[in-house]
Image: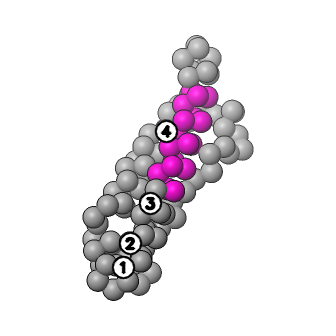
Amino acid sequence: MASGCVTNRAVQTVQVGDEEKSCAQLKAELSDLGVKFEDAKNDSGITGKNVGLAIVFWPGIIVNEVRANKNQESIDRRINHLTQIYNRKCLAGEK
């Protein structure tokens, strides 16, 4: 039942070109990551996916929870990384 599984939305914390991004680019990516984080958060707990898996394959709930947590953690690490760059570049007056 692959359709009931949480998708892998993990992101790489540090990416090539992060330091060269403009303030506007950093702000846009942080906004996008906020949406991704909320989506990943919505994949955990009692969801339609987990209820469906409970009926068919209960260990799938554990897999979904682990994957949802990994997705959230990776997005959170990326947000923290980009926030540090944004604070250093954009709040210090460098545009």
Q: Is residue 65 visible?
A: yes
Residue marked by disc 3 = 68
**Which amino acid type is shown beneath numbered disc 4?**
Leu
Residue marked by disc 4 = 30
Q: Residue at x 50, y 43 (%)?
A: 76
Highlighted magenta segment, given as a residue range: 70-86
Q: Are marks 2 and 4 in contact (CB under 8 Å)?
A: no
Quadrant position of residue 40? bottom left
Distance from disc 1 to disc 2, alpha carbons, whole Å, reads 6 Å
**Side (left or right) of 73 relative to 16:** left
Nearer to us in this view, 10 or 32: 10
Is label 4 in a helix, a strand or a loop?
helix
Q: Is residue 26 visible?
A: no
> Majority secondary structure of the magenta segment?
helix
- Dot 3, how many residues are within 10 Å of its Cα: few (below 14), some (14-19), or many (20+)? many
Vertical placement of 94 versus 37: above or below? above
Query: Mark 3 or 4 closer to N-term?
Result: 4
Q: Which mark is residue 61?
A: 2
Is label 3 in a helix, a strand or a loop?
helix
**Which amino acid type is shown beneath numbered disc 1?**
Trp
Q: Are marks 3 and 4 in contact (CB under 8 Å)?
A: no
Query: Mark 2 or 4 closer to N-term?
Result: 4
Residue marked by disc 1 = 58
In front: mark 1 or mark 4?
1
